[in-house]
Amino acid sequence: MTTALVTGATSGIGAAFARALARRGWDLVLVARDEERLEAEARAHRAAGRRVEVLRADLADRADVDRVAARLEDADRPVDLLVNNAGFSVREPLTGRDVAAHDRAFEVMVRAVLVLSGAAGRAMRARGRGRIVNVGSTAGRMTMGGYSAIKAWVTVFTEGLSNELAGTGVTAMVLEPGWVRTEFHERAGISASSMPSALWLDADALVESALKDLSRGVVVSTPSLRYKALMLVVRHGPRGGVRRVSRALSSRRRASLSP
């Protein structure tokens, strides 16, 4: 049997990955902070005949990250696919005095990705097979504050990881979604009406596209033709233009934030 470990597995893209993999016959290790929601997700997948393990962990807590890493390196219970999905919006300005929110973001979306990818990579390399997916964002191609900077790191880190694992039977892919209709933006207080409707993606369709890219050995996956086209312009256009668009999007997002 094949087993996938998914972080941030109780909602949004993480839950969509779990659904898609369960439909394909994978067993699951679901990781998230909310134990009640973890158990609810697990019950649904078990009812469909899948074996599901739940692992409550706050990835801002280094001891919890170490527990998840140990599970990834458990040779008696191999994990064939790691999906590093846990994350959240960072609204605090870069010039603010209080950097607590940035610290938490670094722990969850940078350090945890580093530690868990490393643990999975070591275990998978020893077996000669495995796949790692790190969820980045098209925001990492933009200049929209701390979140953009973090997701830019995720992309470059994953590309470097892919190089390091080349020829071992283990692959690494970064998924760079655009705006996706999930709880992520609701929790951030960002209204769906604040962005053009054509830019919003469906989480399940996004994951299906990502899994196709993963099977083809794609290293940087950008779901949907419209985002592929947009990111082509962003990558090859003048950076001054990217900064101007980023300022406009940031202003529009701030205007949409719930009070």
Image (tube, rainbow, N blue to C red):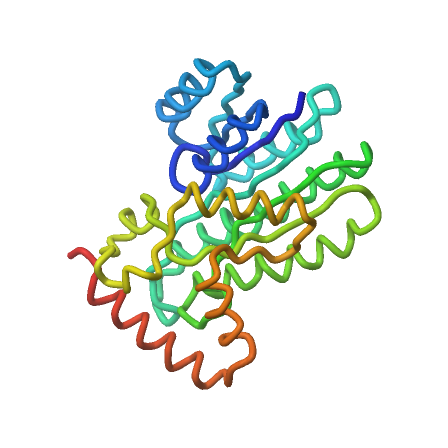
State which quarter of the image contains the C terminus: bottom left
Q: Residue furthest front?
A: 225
Give left or right: position of 5 versus 216. left
Q: Residue at x 56, y 79 (%)?
A: 236
Q: Position of residue 244 (x, y in %)?
A: 38, 82
Vertical position of residue 155 compared to residue 240: above or below = above
Vertical position of residue 245 compared to residue 158: above or below = below
Query: Foreground residue, 101 or 33?
Result: 33
Q: Residue at x 66, y 25 (%)?
A: 2
Query: Foreground residue, 48 or 254?
Result: 48
Give left or right: position of 142 versus 95. right
Vertical position of residue 41 compared to residue 175: above or below = above
Q: How many marks?
A: 0
Quarter assignment of residue 1: top right
Q: Residue at x 55, y 16 (%)?
A: 51
Q: Position of residue 99 (x, y in %)?
A: 40, 60
Q: Position of residue 148 (x, y in %)?
A: 46, 64
Q: Residue at x 71, y 58 (%)?
A: 160
Query: Foreground residue, 59 or 232?
Result: 232
Q: Position of residue 223 (x, y in %)?
A: 50, 55
